[in-house]
Amino acid sequence: MHTLSCIKCRASYQSEDPDPYYCSPCNEQRKAVAAQVEATIGNRPSKKKVMSGLQEYEAAPKVRGFMVVKL
């Protein structure tokens, strides 16, 4: 076991990992904030991809090699 200090609040804690990280209370707080952000942002619809002119041309239906254009 290694005695380490938390990278956020500098409280000491013990861990088998030799690298310092968050202590248990700070880690729980970090997870709560992440869950709150995911609940807020996770339900938003994703943005529609922006296509370049070449991508639009390649994705368009073609007849005899030419794009079908409806006016």
Image (cartoon, rainbow, N blue to C red):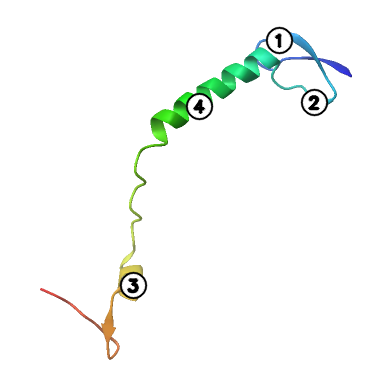
Q: Amino acid at mark 4?
A: Ala
Q: Position of residue 12 (x, y in %)?
A: 77, 9
- In the image, which is nearer the foreground, mark 4 or mark 3? 4
Which residue is labeled 4 in the image? 35
* Distance (Cα) linking label 3 and label 2: 50 Å
Residue 68 appears left or right of 11: left
Nearest to N terminus: mark 2 or mark 4: 2
Nearest to N terminus: mark 1 or mark 3: 1
* Distance (Cα) linking label 2 and label 1: 14 Å
| Image point (58%, 21%), residue name | 30
| Image point (10%, 73%), residue name | 71
Among the 4 quarters of the image, the one containing residue 64: bottom left
Nearest to N terminus: mark 3 or mark 2: 2
Q: Amino acid at mark 3?
A: Ala
| Image point (80%, 25%), residue name | 19
Tag 4 secondary structure: helix
Which residue is labeled 2 in the image? 19
Nearest to N terminus: mark 4 or mark 1: 1
Which residue is labeled 3 in the image? 59
Which residue is labeled 1 in the image? 10
Q: Give the residue furthest to the top.
A: 11
